[in-house]
Image (cartoon, rainbow, N blue to C red):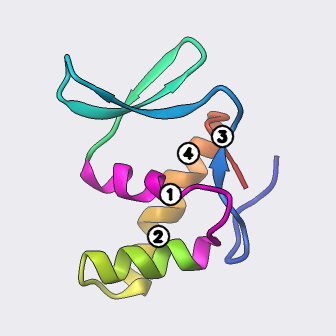
Amino acid sequence: MSALDADSLPRFLPGVRLHRDQARAQWVVLAPERVIELDEVAHAVLLRCDGQRSLATIIEELANEFDADPAAVAPDVLALLGELLDKRIVQA
């Protein structure tokens, strides 16, 4: 499993996808035998995990979207993606 750095290109592992759960009226991540409920910020992060955008680009886009300093956004993005990397939801 690779570590995250500014050049990482996070993406979902095969068999994992974002899904709008109508029953819960929220976005979730569907993974084999797991469902992970997402809040608005986690959804915004994971929408960008397409394997095409670097971690640095994702942080910059989120900072712009939420009118925040990239240095303030980075720790939360790294924590979320690090946790999902450990759970084998994303790869970098």
Separation of residues labelled 3 and 4 (CA atoms): 5 Å
Identify the residue position indicated by label 3 in the image: 86
Q: Tell me the amino acid under the disc marked 1.
A: Ala
| Label 3 CA crowd tier, 10 Å (few <14, some 14–19, many 20+) | few
CB within 8 Å, label 3 to label 4: yes
| Label 4 CA crowd tier, 10 Å (few <14, some 14–19, many 20+) | few
Residue 9 location in percent, x, y? 70, 63
| Label 1 CA crowd tier, 10 Å (few <14, some 14–19, many 20+) | few
Identify the residue position indicated by label 1 in the image: 79
Identify the residue position indicated by label 2 in the image: 75
Residue 87 location in percent, x, y? 62, 34
CB within 8 Å, label 1 to label 2: yes
In depth, the one of 66 and 81 nearer the eye is 66
Residue 50 location in percent, x, y? 60, 55
Residue at x-position 73% and y-position 56%: 92
Identify the residue position indicated by label 4 in the image: 83
In the rendered image of this protein, does residue 46 appear above or below residue 5?
above
Task: Write the start and end of the magenta stretch as one range.
Answer: 40-56
